[in-house]
Image: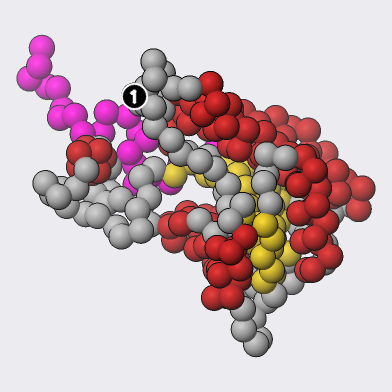
Amino acid sequence: MLLSNRVALLTGGAGRLGRVIAATLQREGASVAIVDKDGQAAKAVAGELGGKGKPAVTAICGDVSDAGEVSRMVGEAAANLGQIDILVNCAAIVPSRLVVDVEVEEWDRVFAINVRGTMLMCQAMARDWIANGVKGAIVNLSSGAGQSARAGGAHYSGSKAALNMLTEVLAIELGPHAIRVNALAPGLILDDVVTEESDAHHPYINLMLRGTPLGRTGAPEDIAEAVAFLASERSSWTTGSIISITGGSHCGRTHMPPTEDLF
């Protein structure tokens, strides 16, 4: 197992990606603190993963955008599971709104959760790890949207672009303490993998399929496996990386034909 005897704190752990990441971390031997603003959902995921002979799981309710809440959640996770040495920041909101229509409150909330929340979690864990000499690993969940603009995504794409830079800065600042910081930038992830275009799909899905060389949408498991790798010692010389997991859709104008006869 990749993460035997490790302790992970996972934000957004009750979400569509988070619950699969939690299960994967536990499968690889880590105890997991599932943090989510929806406390009941967090407890439900913890209940699904709990069982005799399995690494321990605990559920914690809180808001990552609040510094006081972050301090409490980190303390509670350590009290329940022991010294944390993996942090996975998965908590995020994903609105879509044209700039001419977006309200200031929505704009600020996106950055409060997606950027400030991640920063606060990283800050709290980094302070603890430096004080205790822990060689920790941080994995931030970014997005392909942070590297490729789309209509309606100014606040979300902007927040993920900021997250990418935060990841690189933290890698520089924390590297001397043997703390690694990386990010994953997923493409389109759906609960059920789609491989063929259909009139029943949202047009966005069909367009993404055309632009994805591997010809399918992603699954939560595609991301969870990468999280486990980046959290493990198998990636011990990897830090400051923003790894695209998109089926190739990040490579550019992938759905355009060759241009030999164009000119």
Looking at the image, which is closer to me, 215 or 197? Answer: 197
Establish if 45 lies above or below 205.
below
Question: Does residue 218 appear to the left or right of 125 in the view shown?
Answer: left
What quarter of the picture does the C terminus occupy? top left
**Residue at figure coordinates x 77%, y 61% from the top left:** 77
At which x and y percent is residue 172? Answer: 74, 32
Establish if 83 lies above or below 73.
below
- The number of numbered discs placed on residues in the rendered structure image is 1
Q: Name the residue under label 1.
A: 151
Question: Does residue 202 appear to the left or right of 85 in the view shown?
Answer: left
Residue 95, by quadrant, is top left
Snapshot colouring: secondary structure
Range of magenta residues: 235-263
Question: Is 153 included in the stretch rendered in magenta?
Answer: no
**Residue at figure coordinates x 78%, y 68% from the top left:** 81
**Residue at figure coordinates x 35%, y 53% from the top left:** 190
Question: Does residue 80 appear to the left or right of 110 in the view shown?
Answer: right
At which x and y percent is residue 102? Answer: 44, 22
At which x and y percent is residue 219? Answer: 38, 57
Q: What residue type is labelled 1?
A: Ala
Question: Does residue 64 appear to the left or right of 242 in the view shown?
Answer: right
Seen as rendered, the residue at the extreme right is: 131
What quarter of the picture does the N terminus occupy? bottom right
The answer to whether residue 234 is seen in the rendering is: no
